[in-house]
Image (spheres, helix red, strand yellow):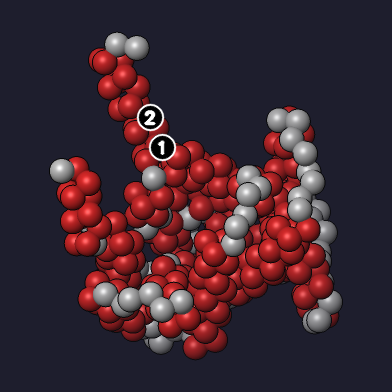
């Protein structure tokens, strides 16, 4: 292939990766749009997640059928998927429940401290070194949460709401660590299919624990439309585009563009649901996103890694 064509192909692949990464982050940030729309017509949190996960399972299973892929999974990886499914369900359930206690945009932004939690857990339990960047990131994240704790209308945010989001962040951080530390060989689509399958089971079991959390029937086309949107846009589409982005431009740039997730949720909350946006909330968002960007980019631009690259280049 001619060198010019190779350069053009490389550039197009990079461009495709960045576009997919941006769209993946924006589509994931649309979770509050579907959830709050269903809340407004009286659908409870468990039902919203039941239909989100259930319809996503159907869509992902359809992908495997079209690709003529096997549904079989080794027992070891199936047990890991079961654990991940429970963690993911708890994370989603905690986050979606927090929407009842605070603005969805604020909740989604506080959730985005999970990379910092990952760094702390890895340092404490896996003896990873805590760098200066990590320490600064943690301080910035805590400061940002402190800024967000004062709600848009001047009143303090619900303590229960904040705790729910922190639980969601922690369980998602554990989810990421288990994925990284496990020797999973199945595809991302198949893994997500079984994770959501066990997630549905977790939601159903948890719904039996309270009479007010039973699974409700969707009775109108609008309800089914919002539920399908939740399953398709912030779940299936976001997942597939994220995989494409990672393969095209790498995991670090894709993760950095993930900062658009909470920003999308804030925009939706303010423009669609009339949530109040203040300078204080904006400052808190900037602090948290700065912390996350530092914790992510810090691992890619660590001085030792740069030195090693230079040595090999010589």
Left or right, residue 281 beside residue 121? left
Left or right, residue 208 beside residue 146? right
Point out the image quarter for the N terminus.
top left
Residue drawn at 44 percent across, 44 percent down: 246
Observer-nearest residue: 72 or 297? Answer: 72
Marks 2 and 1, the one that precedes in the sequence: 2
| Residue 128 higher or lower than 82, as above or below | below
Q: Could you say which disc has been placed on residue 13 in the image?
A: 2
Spatial separation of the CA atoms under disc 2 and disc 1? 6 Å
Q: Quadrant of residue 218?
A: bottom right
Task: Write down the residue under mark 1.
Answer: 248
Observer-nearest residue: 174 or 231? Answer: 174
Q: Quadrant of residue 89?
A: bottom right
Tell me the crowding category of disc 2: few under 14, some 14 to 19, or many 20 or more residues within 10 angstroms, Cα based: some
Tell me the crowding category of disc 1: few under 14, some 14 to 19, or many 20 or more residues within 10 angstroms, Cα based: many
Point out the image quarter for the C terminus.
top left
Q: Quadrant of residue 8?
A: top left
Residue drawn at 82 percent across, 59 percent down: 217
Residue drawn at 22 percent across, 46 percent down: 312
Estimate the x, y position of residue 168 in percent, counting from the top left: 55, 74
- SS assignment at label 2: helix
The reply to whether the C-beta atoms of the residues labelled 2 and 1 are less than 8 Å apart is: yes
Q: Could you say which disc has been placed on residue 256 in the image?
A: none
- SS assignment at label 1: helix
Estimate the x, y position of residue 179 in percent, counting from the top left: 57, 61
């Amino acid at each position: 292939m001619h060198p010019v064509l190779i350069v053009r192909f490389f550039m197009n692949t990079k461009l495709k990766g960045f576009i997919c990464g941006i769209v993946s982050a924006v589509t994931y940030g649309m979770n509050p749009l579907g959830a709050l729309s269903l809340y407004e017509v009286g659908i409870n949190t468990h039902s919203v997640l039941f239909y989100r996960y259930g319809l996503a399972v159907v869509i992902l299973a359809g992908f495997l059928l079209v690709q003529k892929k096997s549904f079989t999974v080794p027992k070891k990886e199936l047990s890991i998927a079961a654990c991940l499914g429970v963690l993911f369900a708890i994370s989603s359930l905690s986050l979606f429940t927090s929407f009842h206690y605070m603005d969805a945009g604020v909740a989604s932004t506080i959730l985005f401290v999970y990379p910092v939690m990952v760094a702390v857990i890895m340092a404490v339990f896996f003896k990873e070194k805590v760098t200066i960047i990590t320490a600064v990131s943690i301080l910035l994240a805590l400061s940002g949460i402190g800024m967000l704790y004062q709600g848009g209308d001047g009143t303090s945010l619900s303590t229960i709401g904040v705790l729910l989001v922190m639980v969601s962040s922690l369980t998602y951080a554990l989810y990421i660590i288990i994925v990284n530390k496990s020797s999973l060989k199945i595809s991302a689509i198949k893994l997500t299919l079984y994770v959501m399958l066990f997630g549905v089971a977790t939601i159903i079991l948890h719904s039996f624990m309270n009479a007010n959390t039973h699974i409700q029937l969707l009775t109108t086309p609008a309800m089914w439309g919002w539920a399908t949107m939740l399953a398709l846009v912030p779940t299936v589409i976001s997942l597939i585009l994220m995989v494409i982005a990672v393969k095209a431009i790498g995991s670090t740039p894709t993760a950095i563009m993930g900062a658009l997730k909470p920003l999308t949720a804030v925009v939706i909350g303010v423009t669609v649901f009339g949530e109040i946006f203040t300078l204080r909330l904006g400052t808190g968002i900037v602090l948290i996103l700065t912390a996350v960007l530092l914790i992510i980019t810090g691992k890619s631009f660590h001085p030792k890694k740069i030195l090693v690259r230079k040595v090999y280049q010589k």
